[in-house]
Each structure stands twice: as C-alpha cells, then as structure tokens.
Amino acid sequence: MLDFIQSSLETKALYATQSWIKTNASHLKDMDCSEVSMKEMEKISVLKNPSEVLGVFAIPTQPTHDLRSINDLILMLDDIRDPGNLGTIIRTADWFGIRHIICSENTVDAYNPKVVQASMGSLARVQVSYKNLNNTIRSKPDYMKVFGAVLEGNDMVEVAKPNYGIVLIGSEAHGISKELMPLVDMPITIPKYISSKLGASAESLNASIATAIICYEFRRKQSS
Amino acid sequence: MLDFIQSSLETKALYATQSWIKTNASHLKDMDCSEVSMKEMEKISVLKNPSEVLGVFAIPTQPTHDLRSINDLILMLDDIRDPGNLGTIIRTADWFGIRHIICSENTVDAYNPKVVQASMGSLARVQVSYKNLNNTIRSKPDYMKVFGAVLEGNDMVEVAKPNYGIVLIGSEAHGISKELMPLVDMPITIPKYISSKLGASAESLNASIATAIICYEFRRKQSS
C-alpha cells in the first residue's frame, strides 16, 4: 500500500484499521484515512483474508511510451490473458528495473483486482500501456530490435548483449500471433539444458516464467 | 493428457469426445476410453472451458527420494501454499530436467486440481514427495550443499558451478522458515541489476519466478 501512497498516483480514499494507522502514521502525513474495524474491512474487501488497509486510487492516464526516448529494455505482451501472469510480469519487471510494458489491446486489464494483487505494489512504478502492437512495432526506430520468445528460436544465451530492445512475449495459449511474427528481428528460446537420454520434458514454460528468465538473462548480459 | 497416459501412472478411467478419440487413437492402443459429448464433459469437469478429454489416474506411491542416489539438483519447497505456484514450479523443473521435488508437509498438495492444471502434464515426469525437511536435510550426505533463496544473500551469479545440491525455496509469505535457515550452506539472492538512481523497486519476486531463475542460472552454469 505504501508503494501506491508514495507514488504519483492520485489517492481517492484510504481505509485502515487503528493499528495500521498507528504503525504507518509517519507515511500518511496529512492524508485523509478513515479508521475501520477488521469486520468492516471484511465487508469492503474482495479478499477472503483482507489486509488491514484498503486504498482507492485513480487509474493513471495511459503513458505515451515514445519508443525513441526509451533507452532500455521494453516488454511487449501479445494477448496475455491470465491476471496472475500479468501481475507477476509487472512485479518481475519492477525487480529488474524494467519500467515500460506495452500490452496488446486484448491483454487482460492491468487494473483488474487480481492483477493489482499479484503485482504486489509494482504497478506504482512500472508504466503499462495498451496499444496496437503491430502499429507500435512498425513505428519503432531501426536501431531498436525485437526479441521474440518462441519455442524454436536462437539459444537466448548465445544472443549478443541487448542494450535496449523490445522483448515480445506471446499469449499463454498461442504464443506470438501470426500477425506479429514477421516483425520479430531475433526469435529467442530458453535452453532446456537437458540430455537427450532423459526423454520427454515440458513442452513450454508458463508465460510469466519465460518473461522472467529472459529479463534476468538480458540484465545479466548487460552487466557483464 | 498424453503425458499422463504414456507415463507409469495407473489409468483408472478415461472420458473423451468422439473427435479426440479419433485424433488420438494411435496413443490409446487397447485402453478403455468412454465416449462422451461436450455437454456431458461440461458436467463432469471442474473447468469452465472443459478439455475434450478427462482422465482419472491413481496417485502414485510417494517416491523415497534417497538423497545419496540423486546426482543432480533437487528442489525443496518450504511451505509453498499457492497451487498455481506449485504447479508452475513442477512445470519449470520438468523443462530444466529436474526430476526431484521434496515438499514440506505444509506445502499444498501436488494432486490438488489447480496444481495438476498449472503443471501442464509435468507431474507425469517429476517426482514429488512430502517430508519433514529438517530431518531430510540433516540426513543428506556432506558433499550435497543446500542453496537457500533469500533476499540478502550471496549474488547467485558469483556462486561456483553447482553440480548437484539442494535448492531450498521458502514460502510466499515468510521465505525460508527460521527452523531451516541454520541448515542452509549457501544463502543466494537473485541480483536486481538496477542502478541506485532508479529508486525503489519490487521487494521480492514471486516464489515460482525465483525458483525458475535459480534453476535456469544453475543449469546455465553446469553447461558452461
């Protein structure tokens, strides 16, 4: 909650228990905060085990995400449907200091309560916009490359250090859409590192897991 | 479904639509499979969008997981409570060819339907057991080290190549329990790779994300 209160988001209302208010008084300053009992909290929260604080914030204006001014990695999500996955991707991006996520118009809403919950406060720092990805990629500067996560691409570890660029992640069910595949400059795959004698193994990774491993590997490369 | 049918699990019953049976006849051989309509499937499945096939399998006997005979990485999960996280961890372990997961007795049941669904068939290949982790770690051979995922440990990237060993992951809410921390040989942390001028960032990673990044990094090290 403090992540949100201390962010640039506009706080519309704040409800908290007496003990939460006491503990966090120094962060609240002159903010309005209504004191409620846990019983009242159970009624206003959608959670089975409600937190001691509930805030209402204005959904921020969508960031413009001008690709020419972003000198870092950008995540692009092509129809991520699962709120838990989107929330986890936002949280992971925040961990690795990736501040820009551009979602396709069919990606789940970042302000869906399940996404907000899974993102654990990181929505206060990561900028999320919804755009037509085809048009957005076509308008990018030439020097910015598109790395697309696929099942049979180049070994991600062998790819040169990506100082900036777009990491494109496909949907849980269908991967990167047919429409966007021709715009991918470098199809990349997370190596399995398994010996052939082991036999079968998982066909794919969860979308948020694949995103995290790629972000980690690219950040590791950048730092070396 | 084919992952399970082709595994060593005992098939108790199989229900599928006519079209699924037609497509997969070669895999079924002389197996009994009851033909059902999609309408009937909607009634017997717990899913909103039921699959065209539903199988009932016997839960296998718990693997013994004799640590002296496992010459590979082993995952140990200390009270993972979220079924989606456990399922995703099983799927990720399978991707990286990690065949052994030992869960604490308070970890969510691996045969919970949500776990089975998130594991996407990988439960057919990854062996999952439930044990008292304290006793289990105390009985390990000396040469097998315990790498514990913590928020302030050694940079995971700097750790020497781990040819075998235990990767210990704590619970979503509390991390590695106080009881197990003294048994950790090497506390490790996933680096954030962010510059201090960026300001705040996520306090932690989702448990399944942290597990995946550690598995990836250890496998990458082993292969180099």
Image (cartoon, coloured by chain):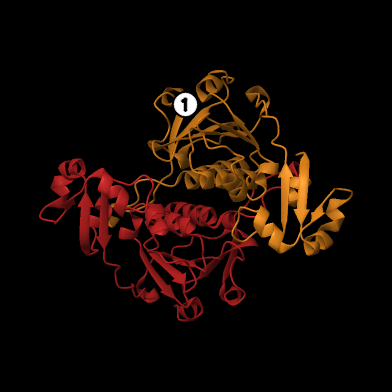
Chain colours: A red, B orange
Would you place residue B180 above or below residue B174 in this image?
Answer: above
Q: Say whether residue A19 is left or right of residue A189.
A: left
| Residue at the spot of label 1 | B185
Element type at mark 1: loop
Q: Quadrant of residue B75?
A: top right
State the image coordinates of residue A154 (x, y, percent, origin top left): 63, 61
Give me the chain letter of mark 1.
Answer: B
- How many marks on residues? 1
State the image coordinates of residue A161 (x, y, percent, origin top left): 49, 59
Q: Quadrant of residue B163?
A: top right
Nearest the viewer among A135 and B117 is B117
What residue is rendered at 39% in x and 49% in y? B192
Q: Quadrant of residue B47?
A: bottom right
Dividing the image into 4 quarters, which one contains the C terminus of chain B? top right
What residue is rendered at 45% in x and 51% in y? A224
Nearest the viewer among A182 and A163 is A182
Would you place residue A81 above or below residue B47 in this image?
Answer: below
Would you place residue B117 above or below residue B22 in this image?
Answer: above
Amino acid type, label 1 = Asp
Residue B34 visible in the picture: yes
Other residues around mark 1 within 10 Å, as few (<14) / some (14–19) / many (≥20): few
State the image coordinates of residue B153 (x, y, percent, origin top left): 39, 35
Residue A200 visible in the picture: no
State the image coordinates of residue B6 (x, y, percent, origin top left): 79, 46
Q: Say whether residue B103 is left or right of residue B43.
A: left
Q: Residue furthest left?
A: A30
